Amino acid sequence: MNSLKFLNFKTTIKFCNERSALLQSIRRGGMFKRSPALKLQAAALQDLYTNFFDNRTELSVEEWQEAKQALVNNNKYISSNNVDAMMIGLFKYGHQLPLAKDYLKYLKKINVEPNVATLGRLLRVYNTAYHERGGSIDSLTPEEQNEILSIYTHFRSKHDVFDTTTCENLIHGLVATERFGDCKELIEMAKLTAVPTVAAYSEVAVKAFSTNDMSYGWQILDEMVTAGKQPRCEVFIAYIEQITKNSDKSFQHEFEKLLEFFGQHDIIISEKVVDYITSLENKNLLSITKSKLSRSGKCRNCNNQMENISVSAADFAKLSNSFLNKVLIRNDVFQKSTPQEVDRFKAFVAETAPYDCVIDGLNVAYSMGIKKSPAMLANLVTNVVKYFSSQNKHVLILGRKHMQNWSKTSWNYIYKNASVFLTNNLTHDDPFLLYATLKSGHHTDFFSRDLMRTHSFLLGPELRPIFRRWQQEHQYSLVTQTEGGKIIVKEPIRFMICAHKVKDTWHLPYKQEYLANPPTSFEVSSNWLCIKFQN
């Protein structure tokens, strides 16, 4: 099939029809991850392995029939429509590939054609075997690779376009063969119906880097982080492994490109990647020390202070100017507000700004739980105002009109020590808070537990990292309130907590295990690498 860019109208219509049929087939095959069919009882599953699968590579027709019936009997969500896919799904390890293939032979013997879901799961077993054997082009035998290509050819003979799940199953199979070029087409096809999964993206990126297709590998990495997906450890290891092969002279440039990528996208690598990076010391490429940071952000190994997180004046101006158009003035932001209220708020800010800190009053009040008395809620807000007013700071409290029914004593203090703007009870607070903060200038802080992910996303890939750095530098939040009424406040972290270079030394945070989702809160990692290049 030609590139997807040249899909014509008829092909698109055909795709829609085929997608509907394929999705029905997948549902029948039980391919959706949330299906209760996957929740087999541990005892029943163990019986299946003990009675049929342990130390076996093939079963007789009668044994497969008995195993299939046992599978159906032990889960009410498994039926004759999806039992074949469920059976293949039981084989989670590469050494079970012969059993999975034998089940397909059994289906052929009883004249049953495997459906899309069944073949898709078989491709996943091939992929597992491929990785368990080393993940190289010759990890699978020529016969096994031909079996994958036969399934792929079978799929392509029946459909021109596939749904996302089928595309990803095919990708998992094809990366174990020489047909990597088809994976590029499939990942584009997958994006027609959904954002590809971390697993599919990572498979393609690893293959790209391991085959020295560096440009395409970086393209996939950029797509992943833009979509909010954290690349798997194997992607970074494949890249580092490849650049150590290319040239010693280009290694520093290529490795620093990766470290800059980590810093730009707040990626915290796992110990698995750290172990591989540390192994490069033996190749006289890097000098590496595991380290920690002091509370002030000083490396305990090299004694360098981490860079200040401060957003430049130019970046702040770009962020502030874009915020109004990209986030604040959007119909869906104000669907629970009115243009009149927005105008009233803007006029209020113009008259009373600049502020030193803008506080989300309702967010603060509910920080310790919503089942508190009005007096306790008001007291919490009052204590936060005191925290800043004791520092002679000009504070804006944003709240809802119903909060006026709380303690009059607390409100008297708040009105005397802060500017106050109360919105209608159904208004979204965050856009108002961010507008007032940004409008007040580069040095204004805000107080909220909200992570502002929606607003960050709406700003787009160029402004998103600027917004996140600004947020880290300026966001206060409430940790707790003691029994004596004292509040403990989490202050902004003013130094960089992502990978960055200080003088001639890189500092790289890491954690024990890989997490699929990128960090949303601002926490200083407990573990860092202190890295220098060996000349």
Image (tube, grey):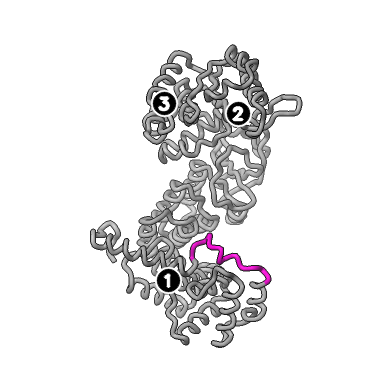
Q: Please indicate, yes or no, whether residue 381 appears anywhere in the rendered image.
A: yes
Disc sitting over residue 339 in the figure? none
Check disc 3: other Cα within 10 Å, few if <14, some if 14-19, many if 20+. Answer: some
Q: Residue at x 42, y 27 (%)?
A: 320
Look at 43% across and 32% down and name the residue there: 336
Pick the quarter of the image with the N terminus.
Answer: bottom left
Q: Position of residue 53 (x, y in %)?
A: 62, 79
Q: Residues within 10 Å of mark 2 (few under 14, many from 20)?
A: many
Secondary structure of the residue carrying tag 1 is helix
Q: Which residue is mark 3?
A: 317
How far apart in space, not on screen, are marks 3 and 1 (Cα)? 53 Å
* Range of magenta residues: 31-43
Q: Where in the figure is residue 279, as x and y percent of width and height?
A: 61, 56
The amino acid type found where label 3 is placed reads Ala
**Earlier residue among tags 2 and 1:** 1
Of mark 3 and mark 1, the one earlier in the sequence is 1
